[in-house]
Amino acid sequence: MRYASIPPEVFIDNRRRFTAMLKPQSVAIFNSNDILPTNADGSMAFRQNNDLFYLSGIDQEESILCIFPDCVDEKHREILFLKETSETIAIWEGEKHSKKSAYEASGIRTVYWLQDFHRILKALVCESENVYLNSNEHLRASIETETRDMRFVKWMKDNYPLHNYQRSAPVMHQLRSVKSNMELELLQTAIDITEKGLRRILKFIKPDVWEHEIEAEFAHEFLRNRSRGFAYTPIIASGYSACVLHYIENNKQCKAGDVILLDVGAEYANYNADMTRCLPVSGKFTPRQKDVYNAVHRVMEAAKKMLRPGTMMADYHREVGKLMTEELITLKLITREDVKKENADWPAYKKYFMHGTSHFLGLDVHDVGLWHKPIQPGMVFTVEPGIYIREENLGIRLENNVMVTMGEPLDMFKNIPVQAEEIEQLMNEA
């Protein structure tokens, strides 16, 4: 991996907190993600299952983690099963984890090769009463490809039909939503790399540059700083394209007078930054562009302050909607009469600000969390209000990443330029 090694104590503590939430006599099993094919003999880049990584620190395909805290045999209370390196694999792909290096990464002493999995699993399952299996239960997930986890769920139920099956996802959502100090450090590293990318392109953007050229500048800066690359498919959207929320073609030329919306973030050690900035292609906003920009900025600053312990996210989003309503009235995009007549399920402000303001951030860009529970210290959220005026070919969105604390929320983007005047100054420096 490109990133610096992570102390195994991080994963030891994660497992400790996970096991504390299991029912007695339970075994929990986590599978790595598949390596997905493209065409011919090609494959996509491997991305580890985030729950397995969170609990073990193992960033390798064909890996299985078993946790059985009540197992009679102490050495089987935590087990890693890994793909064994052969001479052929070592020559063609490079060596995989040894048992020693897997222990050093995870803190798990018992490591077997995959060929031993079914034999040992049988003993574990027969001793247990409950089996926790993993699945992707993200609210926004739309899954058409059968994952390794889901294949394993079917196999387990076929072979051990009389056990009590439990879902690990609710436990993982609760644990992963509150970040440890090391997780916050890794997130901050991803954010700092993202800042370097932004500062690189501030002097690069000018009329007639292509969106994909800007994307390439970000990629260069991310990769040279030990990032795997973009945390998600980047949005480099100039002019009208900024009004298309998930525009990813990045294939247009930036025109003088336009504003370009950059929704990009670097990944580091599987943790993800999520930033949006809007820049004037000509180096200076028009008065109208600046008015809209500053309106979005005011909403973002006010929304950050609302992220306090005990807040319900549904209430938070409603309050942000009220702030945006007032800004849109001031910009003469909606009227108070529009507000009086609005549908409560789709308020008037939604015409120009149609998405939510915040989501969890961490190992997933849209990270897992419990939306129906009050927010807690240690949670990290994006704050990303926007105004999209298609009739003016103008889309403005600003996005920072904010950590909830016992006191004032902490903006993890404290060093990343966001004020309109600072953006203009940096773009025009010699």
Image: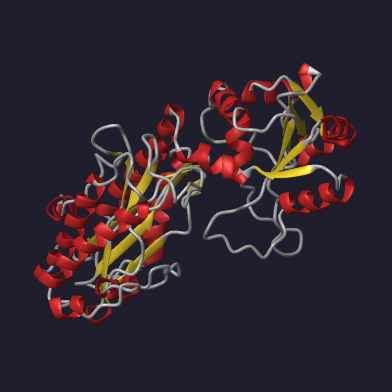
Q: Is residue 36 above or below residue 172?
A: below
Q: Is residue 148 above or below residue 59?
A: below
Q: Is residue 289 left or right of residue 244?
A: left
Colour scheme in the image? Answer: secondary structure
> Residue 66 at what x, y percent from top left?
73, 33
Q: Is residue 183 left or right of residue 188?
A: right
The residue sitting at 37% across, 41% down in the picture is 191
Seen from the viewer's position, the closer of residues 339 and 119 is 339
The residue sitting at 73% across, 53% down in the picture is 150
Q: Is residue 384 left or right of residue 269?
A: left
Q: Where is residue 234, by image quadrant?
A: bottom left
Seen from the viewer's position, the closer of residues 405 and 59 is 405
The residue sitting at 87% across, 51% down in the picture is 158
> Residue 279 at what x, y percent from top left?
24, 60
Q: Where is residue 92, by image quadrant?
A: top right
Q: Where is residue 412, by image quadrant?
A: top left
> Residue 207 at what x, y percent from top left?
25, 68
Question: Is residue 397 in view from this perspective?
Answer: no
Q: Is residue 275 above or below residue 394?
A: above
Question: Is residue 387 in view from this perspective?
Answer: yes
Quadrant for the N terminus in the image:
top right
Q: Is residue 400 left or right of residue 280?
A: right
> Residue 250 at what x, y percent from top left?
42, 68
Q: Residue furthest top?
A: 74
What is the tally of numbered marks visible in this picture?
Answer: 0
